[in-house]
Amino acid sequence: MRFSVTTVSTPEWTPEEAAAAIAAQGWDGIEWRVTDQEPADEPGYWAGNRATWPLTGLEESVPEILRITNEAGLDFSAIGAYVQASDHDNIERLLAATAALGAGSVRIGVPHVPVADYRAVFAATRADLEWVVERAAVHGVKVLVELHHGTIISSASAAYRLVEGLDPERIGVIHDIGNQVIEGFEDIGTAFQILGEYLAHIHVKNAVWWPNGQQGPDAQVMWEHNWSTLRDGQIDIDWLFRALVSIGYDGWVALEDFTDLSTPRDERLLDSLQFLHGSYQRALMWAEWVAAEAAEADAVEEVQTEGPDVEA
């Protein structure tokens, strides 16, 4: 398993600063954010993010992206874009840039909800993805769609319906457990079974719900969600890694960190990396224990089946 950082998580840093810091900490890769964003007086995750490459004219940025990534000694875990599957011109731009970078895969967007007619939007998106997959094959890359709250594929079940029957070599699903704290949660092991060969990438973050102090009708408690550190969220990250190890997943796990803490960014990223390595190692030890228990049970069953070797 390999670990990377999405640069949506590093809004204060320039691309050079982000790549250098991520590499120095021992991360394996980087997932560059690509979008035309709004300007901002202060850097933020979604606007004014300094570690974001513009979508418009992306092809002109390819040499610089390659230089910065290679000089840092990092690999591409993916390209993190937001272009809707229906935007064919920009999808073509993304696919060509991903191929030129040798990045392997690129995330694209799907429609948000609510929509006037969910089934019609779902069907139209599926038709767009059929075209996208054809173009991805021409460019020799893979497109990724993400389990995300507020979209037409917040759950593994919905995502599987969207991609079922398409070439899994050219399209896959990003499982994001943090997003599913908010909407779309299904048992992690079950979700992986549902996605099957379409499970292509992992985003990891955590989140929490808490009473916001407001009251609804008849004194109903109102709740809000927010992002948290990996340690403090509602999802047991060890559970995620046990499920990944159990299916033999050996791909990328990319960190997304949207928390607003006073701790410096580099300290937060390093703590996350150490936590992820620890969780992965605990999952490997758990798998060894499970295998040993199964082997012992099989041995006992075999002895009991054969019975004692005693002559009548």
Image (spheres, helix red, strand yellow):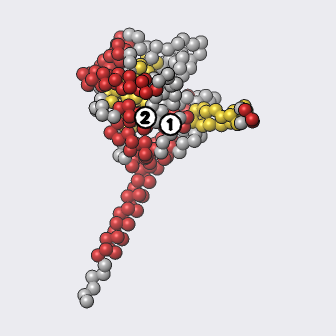
In which quadrant of the rendered image does the C terminus lie?
bottom left
- Give the side of residue 45 with respect to residue 105, left or right: right
The reply to whether callout 1 and callout 2 are in contact (CB within 8 Å) is yes
Picture quadrant of residue 181: top right
Badge 2, how many Cα within 10 Å: few under 14, some, many 20+?
A: some
Q: Nearer the viewer, residue 195 or 265?
A: 195
Q: Amino acid at mark 2?
A: Ala
Dividing the picture into quadrants, the one containing residue 79 is top left
Q: Is residue 91 visible?
A: yes
| Residue at mark 1 to residue at mark 2: CA–CA distance | 9 Å
- What residue is at 31 percent from the left and 74 percent from the top? 305
Give amino acid for label 1.
Gly
Question: In the rendered structure, which disc, 1 or 2, sits on the residue that comes first in sequence?
Answer: 2
- Percent x, y for residue 195? 38, 39
According to the picture, the residue beneath numbered tag 2 turns out to be: 158
Residue on which disc 1 sits: 184
